[in-house]
Amino acid sequence: MNNIIKRKNKRCPRCNFKVPNELTVCPKCQLNYQKFNLATNSEAKVAIREGESDRVLYRKGYPNDVKKSTLILLTIFLGLAGAHYYYVGRKGWGIFFSIFFVVGLINAFLSIYLKTAPTGDWFQLFYLLVLVWGLVIFFWITDIFKVCFNTFKIPVSLPRV
């Protein structure tokens, strides 16, 4: 007896419609799943750069042109600076991580350099920055888990016809 529970439905990555597993085309948006599995990250980067974001879909799992080992190493060692987002072409999130990484470094440097407990306006700014830095670290740790367990969303796109 097989103890594995099989799902009866899957979700379409384009329209989020519940589709029976045996279908190869979404009945709502006509997305062909066989072609979707051949979509590449490099084509998505081109589409994003050219402003054609309607061609870009986000998929969990790794397309052929994204190496899982590279993504894991970038996430673990340079993830606080957003390197893993730059690698897959999600520059908005990469910029977010980079900005707050630099802000956190400046905050840490100033608190070490001043060698005193923050007071006055600096006190409020210091603890606000510590809070933001804590959120960035939380996002970074969740990204490590997402990358390791194949739930990190990677942009993919089919070549233009």
Image (cartoon, grey):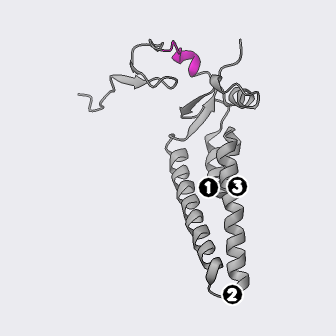
**Residue type, label 1:** Ile
In the displayed orientation, state which residue is furthest to the front: 121
Sort mark 1 into few (<14), some (14-19) or many (20+) by Cα contacts within 10 Å. some
Sort mark 3 into few (<14), some (14-19) or many (20+) by Cα contacts within 10 Å. some
Please identify the quadrant where the C terminus is shown: top right
| Residue position for label 1 | 76
- Residue 98: image tag: 3
Q: Nearer the viewer, residue 119 or 136?
A: 119
Q: Nearer the viewer, residue 70 or 92?
A: 92
Residue 152 drawn at (x, y percent): 54, 41
- The span picked out in magenta is 29-36
Q: Residue 129's image quarter?
A: bottom right
Sort mark 2 into few (<14), some (14-19) or many (20+) by Cα contacts within 10 Å. few
| Residue position for label 2 | 115
| Residue drawn at (53%, 14%) of the image | 32
Q: CA distance from mark 1 to mark 3?
A: 15 Å
For marks 1 and 3, give the one nearer the viewer.
Answer: 3
Q: CA distance from mark 1 to mark 2?
A: 30 Å
| Residue drawn at (62%, 74%) of the image | 126
Q: Is residue 34 magenta?
A: yes
Q: Residue 20's image quarter?
A: top left
